[in-house]
Amino acid sequence: MKVLLRNDVRGVGRRGDIVDVKSGYARNFLLPTGAALVANDSMELQAASMRKARDLRDAQSRTAAETQRGVIEAAKVTIAARAGANGRLFGSVTEADIVNALRTATKLSLDRHAIHMDEHLKEVGTATVSAHLFEGVTATITVEVVAK
C-alpha cells in the first residue's frame, strides 16, 4: 500500500516521502495515528511541498546545531563529585549530570539522550563524551571531574 508520510517514521521514511508499506501496518498504525495518508496520483504536488518545507527546516536546524557545537566544544565543563582517597567516585557521573553542568556553563539545554558515553564516569579526571545535536552534527564535550 502506498502512503504519503506526514511525519518522520523511524525505519520507514521521512515527512513528504511516498513509501510502500504493508497494508496492515498502514491500516493499524500509520493511518489511525495520522502519521500517513493513503497516496494517490494527485498527491505528488503535496509531497513535493512537504519535502521542500522539511528541507528548509532541516537546513535551519543544522545551522543552529553547528552553532551550538561551537559553543559546546569551547566550553569547559567541570563536575564536582564525592570521591575517595584513591580518586574513585562514590557514585558516578551520568548523562544527566553532564547536561546540568553544561547548562550552567553555557546556558544551552540539551536532552540527556543526546549525550553518548560508553560508560558512566567513575573516576576523577578528564574525559571526553559526545553529544548528538542533529543528523551529522556531533559535538565533543570535555568533562573534568574533580573531587569535592
Image: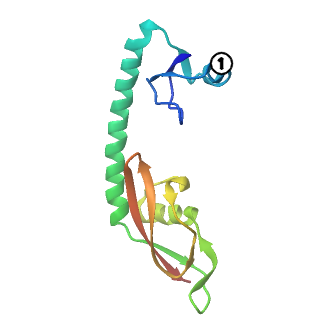
Instruction: Give, as a three-letter code, the residue at label 1.
Output: Arg
Instruction: Determine whether 90 is above or below 39 in the image.
Output: below
User: Residue drawn 55% across and 63% down?
Assistant: 95
* Figure colour scheme: rainbow
Instruction: Determine whether 107 is above or below 3 in the image.
Output: below
**Residue 106 is drawn in which quadrant?**
bottom left
Quarter in which the N terminus is drawn: top right
Compared across the picture, whether 129 is left or right of 36 comes to left
**Residue 59 is drawn in which quadrant?**
top left
Q: Which residue occupies the extreme top position in the image?
A: 42
Give percent across and percent down for residue 108: 43, 56
Residue at numbered disc 1: 27
Labels in figure, total: 1
Give percent across and percent down for residue 41: 44, 7
- The residue closer to the viewer here, 11 or 104, is 11
Callout 1 secondary element: helix
Instruction: Determine whether 136 is above or below 72 in the image.
Output: above
**Residue 53 is drawn in which quadrant?**
top left
Give percent across and percent down for residue 11: 53, 35
Give percent across and percent down for residue 142: 41, 70
User: Residue drawn 44% across and 53% down?
Assistant: 132
- The residue closer to the viewer here, 70 or 24, is 24
User: Residue drawn 37% across and 51% down?
Assistant: 137
Quarter in which the C terminus is drawn: bottom right
Compared across the picture, whether 12 is left or right of 55 comes to right
User: Residue drawn 52% across and 18% down?
Assistant: 3
